[in-house]
Amino acid sequence: MAERCDTCWHAVDLHEGERCRWPGCECGHVVQLELQTWAVVPSKRRLRTDLLALVDSLRDQAHGVVVVDNNDERDGAVDDEIAARGFAGARLQHIHLPGYPPNLSRLYNAGVEVVDALMASLGTERYNVCLLNDDVVVPAGWAVSLEKALRGTPAAMAYTDRLGRSVLALMTAPPPDFSHTATLWACMLRGELKLRYDEQFVWWYGDNDIDLRCRLDHGGTIAVPGPMPDHTHPSEETFNDPVLSRIANTDDAARFNAKWAARMASL
């Protein structure tokens, strides 16, 4: 089946380094990613300017974006603004899942399921899924660097190394402390593994859970050298919302310990 141009979405046979060859198309885009790459972005009452800044940074780094809108009312106007940034037509999928408190695991899963269904409709078996918070801006070349590392190793997940190492680091054991955990707010998964968040974890403990599952059960995670994505409001919602703070620090923490304590003790 023909691949699609990253920019104009025309169905043409493209190879890395080639320009779109659709007759009359003037997008001039040079393909860099080897596989279809889609971003899943839960939007949790965040300022629209933050979401649009993320989309701007993804312009040449993703084939499409799935916005999982958790606002009380569907923000349809944002579609036009995202389309104006290059993600028009089939390249933008916008689903509305309101509800408070938001179940972040459920929001991510809903977005990944949309990507899985779209890839199945295209007959695409191998593809990348980027999980991104809506307050992140990724640097140029971010997606390409993660894809090359992910597809060159057995890892299930790739992310930028927050410890600043100069070589790839494959992680197949639990992290010794928080500084060694994966950056789930900006990472890439092997889409064909059909990984899902465990929806018993409402807030960020779902990140810790999927990090451990990738490390221990799915070939590991790969920490990739390079500039870190910019995370503009880390933990702001957790600190400012007493309900989310209680869920994260008490409820989800208890669920996480119940799920993992025995296995971690046996390692």
Image (tube, rainbow, N blue to C red):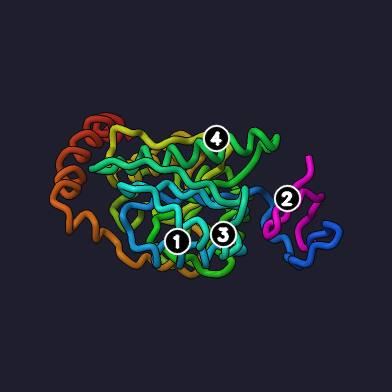
Query: Which residue in the structure is indicated by mark 4?
Result: 193
- State the SS at label 4: helix
Q: Position of residue 200 (x, y in %)?
A: 29, 32
70 magenta-colored: no
Q: Label 4, label 1: how many angstroms apart (C-alpha)?
A: 22 Å
Which of the numbered marks, if any, corresponds to residue 4?
2
Residue linked to disc 3: 83
Kindly identify the amino acid type of the residue bearing the numbered disc 2.
Answer: Arg
Q: Is residue 84 above or below residue 265?
A: below
Q: Are marks 4 and 2 in contact (CB under 8 Å)?
A: no
Magenta highlight range:
1-18
- The amino acid on which the numbered mark 3 sits, given as a three-letter code, is Ala
Do the residues under discs 1 and 3 have CB atoms within 8 angstroms? no
Query: N-terminal of the two: label 4 or label 2?
Result: 2
Give the distance between the C-alpha atoms of the residues marked 4 and 2, in whole angstroms: 22 Å
The reply, left or right, for residue 127 in relation to residue 133 is right
* Residue 98 falls left or right of residue 88: left
Please tell me how crowded label 4 is: few (under 14), some (14-19), or many (20+) other residues with Cα within 10 Å. few
**Label 2 crowd bin: few (<14), some (14–19), many (20+), radius 10 Å:** some
Dot 1 or dot 3, earlier in sequence: 3
Q: Give the percent coordinates (x, y) of residue 15.
A: 79, 55
Between label 3 and label 4, give the one nearer the viewer. 3
**Nearer-N-terminus badge (4/1):** 1
Please tell me which of labels 2 and 1 falls first in the chain.
2
At horizontal 52% and vertical 67% (from top left) the residue drawn is 56
Say if 69 sits above or below 231 in the image.
Answer: above
Q: Is 200 left or right of 54, judged from the image as shown?
A: left
The label nearer to you, 4 versus 2, is 2
Earlier sequence position, callout 3 versus callout 4 = 3
Q: Which residue is mark 1?
A: 161
